[in-house]
Image (cartoon, rainbow, N blue to C red):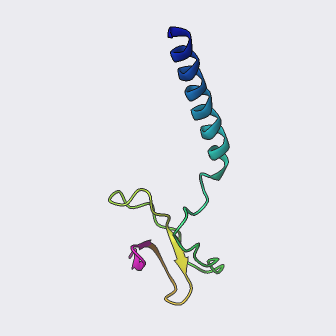
Amino acid sequence: MTLIKTFLAAVAIAAGLTAGVMGAGVANAVPPGYPAGDEPPPGAPAKPPQPRWSPDTPVVWEQLGYRWGIWINGSFLPLH
């Protein structure tokens, strides 16, 4: 029984490490459910830093309003 528990623990750790390695290359990708935003034009203002109050939402460019912002619950919040 101890051998089975040890084996299952080792498989769980290996699966976690494999998932971490596979996901490491998509760190800058937009998470699922968030619009990717538009490509900023050459004269656009500099991209603002990530808001501390929303660390998991990507900062994207919105061409319609010519501004940077984040998407939260389907609404665009500009970062001024």
For the residue pair 31 and 40, the one nearer the viewer reads as 31
Name the image quarter holding residue 74. Answer: bottom left
Q: Is residue 12 visible?
A: yes
Over which residues does the magenta segment extend?
71-80
Q: Residue at x 52, y 70 (%)?
A: 34
Confirm whether residue 45 shows in the render: no
Indicate the position of residue 19 as horizontal and vertical percent values: 62, 40
**Residue 69: x percent and y percent?**
45, 74
Residue 79: x %, y % from top left: 40, 74
Identify the residue at horizontal 67%, vertical 48% (top origin).
25
Number of marks present in the image shown: 0
Q: Which residue is situated farthest in the front direction here? A: 1
Q: Main secondary structure of the magenta part?
A: strand
Q: Residue at x 53, y 90 (%)?
A: 64
User: Height in image: 71 above or below 6?
Assistant: below
Q: Residue furthest top?
A: 2
- Outermost residue, bottom side: 64
